[in-house]
Amino acid sequence: MVALTPETGNRNNKAYKLLRTAVDAAVDAGVLETNPVVIKASHRRTAPLKHKQLPTDQELLAILNNTPARYRLAVALCLFHGLRVGECLALQRRHVVRVANGWVVRVEATLVRVPDRTGRMVMKRQPPKTQAGYRDVPILKEHRSLVVKHLAEYVEPRPGALVTTTATGGTVMDTSFRSVFHRAKSKAGVRSEITPHYGRNWLITRLAEQQATPTEIGRILGQSDLSTILHTYMRVREHRPGELMAAVSIESTDHHRAG
């Protein structure tokens, strides 16, 4: 690693940000659980990797409420429905479908940042990496009105129109989306370590608390590796041990004698 010096600090800082952003994409894709790219000054000790704390409903709602309206649906899909950033940005109008009991989004593609022939970074549409990535995700009832409002105000009527675009109607870069997310997070005053990927942890844990099986959870999240769900993603909210123990009862001695 190039030493951090006053002469090269700006260069190194830019390189660090680019590297961290690239690894963020791997986190969103489910390849890594956390971003290990953390550079500290040489005279400091690197802090041990912290266990990822499950975000609270209030934290996620605060981020959503501080997100610009144009990007609010995409943030809701990341934080509360388990979609990856690239999956959100790839959604087209035809993928947002009205059904008898609400709405679903059909995940059939992802947008990935790649260099074009000139070396300029662009977003390229690609199919999901695994068959599990193809899925229908029901929209939570709390966000159905957001879907209706967003489609009416920000999405062109043609089936192939992107659901989330820039103010000029262009494709949103994943880096730009992250910048929007981080600004909303800053305004919300929540923990700085929360990323869009935290929504997957939140949803998987909530589904597990509703007695969903690992297979059922994987179907909603587009996750074929069930061991990842069991050993990496599941998080138990801090108050759950108390709730579970409160539900445990011991049969009285008299009851046993009566039997």
Image: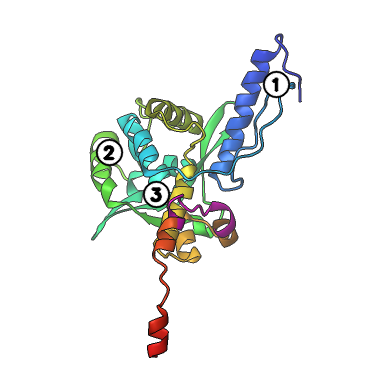
Judged from the image, the secondary structure of the residue bearing numbered disc 2 is helix
Quick check: marks 1 and 2 in contact, CB under 8 Å?
no
Q: Nearer the viewer, residue 14 or 3?
A: 3
Mark sitting on residue 58 = none
Label 2, on which residue?
A: 150
Q: Quadrant of the C terminus?
A: bottom left
Nearest to viewer (mark 3 / mark 1): 1
- Determine whether, in the image, residue 183 is placed left or right of residue 123: left
Quick check: marks 2 and 3 in contact, CB under 8 Å?
no
Q: Quadrant of the N terminus?
A: top right
Amino acid at circle 3: His
Label 1, on which residue?
A: 41
Residue 132 pos. (x, y %):
51, 59
Label 3, on which residue?
A: 81
Q: CA distance from mark 3 to mark 1?
A: 38 Å
Residue 151 pos. (x, y %):
27, 40
Specify the segment rendered in magenta: 230-241
Quick check: marks 3 and 1 in contact, CB under 8 Å?
no
Nearest to viewer (mark 2 / mark 3): 3
